[in-house]
Amino acid sequence: MHLQDARYIVVEGPIGVGKTSLVKKLADHLAATPLLENDRNNPFLAHYYQDRARFALPTQLFFLMERHEQLRHLAQPQLFTPTTVADFLPEKDALFAQATLNEDEFRLYSKVHAALCSPADAAPPAPDLVIFLHAPTEVLTRRVLQRARPMESALDERYLARISEAYNQFFGHYDRAPVLTVNSAHLDFVNQEADFSLLLQHIDAMRGPRAFLNRGL
């Protein structure tokens, strides 16, 4: 795979793994348009972190509708920018919904999702490449604490472990696009150019639907 040929790239992973920072780095490298998840727009998110059972459904529905609006231009080729690098995959919404909603709430969420993506040409295309970042739960916990966002103060290691495992399960079966799975525990793509170059080398070396980058200490 040649990174320069990709027109729609997604960086995904659990909270604290560094996906948004990598999107900005890739977008700058490719002179591409970054498409970022803006969680500050979600009026329910801070409440969700404090009371997940009560605010899970409105939080998920708000994200679903906002991401659909953000990605709508990708379903219209005449408006498609030369390259877009996003820090979210629309299918990720279902991952969080399944992990946080009860059965009745998930049924309602699924109906809204189906309505938004009908007709089929309203759905965004599959990415040319997905970079799935993951890291051990203790690393995610440390990074979340280091960035010290007030709304994330209620997050605990058990919750992060559950979301991280949901991501692992999801990308273990995801087949809509080539996936490069990256253990980011010992990689710093923003501050270490050697790490970023290593990532680019692994992307260019991809010859199939799956590849892995896992560097230890």
Image (cartoon, helix red, strand yellow):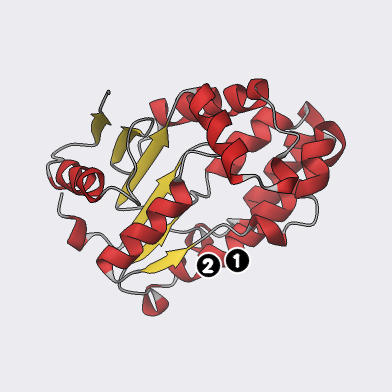
Above or below: residue 118 compared with residue 135: below
SS for dot 1: helix
The reply to whether residue 126 is in sight is no
| Residue at 55 percent of width and 31 percent of height | 142
* Coordinates of residue 206 in the picture (x, y in percent): 16, 40
Residue contact between numbered discs 1 and 2, judged by CB atoms under 8 Å: yes
* Coordinates of residue 195 in the picture (x, y in percent): 24, 43
- Residue for badge 1: 69
SS for dot 2: helix
Crowd rating for badge 1 (residues with CA inside 10 Å; few <14, some 14–19, many 20+) = few
* Coordinates of residue 120 in the picture (x, y in percent): 50, 57
Q: Which one is in front, 164 or 139?
A: 139
Q: Which mark is residue 72?
A: 2
Crowd rating for badge 2 (residues with CA inside 10 Å; few <14, some 14–19, many 20+) = some
Q: Which one is in front, 189 or 20?
A: 189
The reply to whether residue 194 is in sight is yes
* Coordinates of residue 83 in the picture (x, y in percent): 32, 68
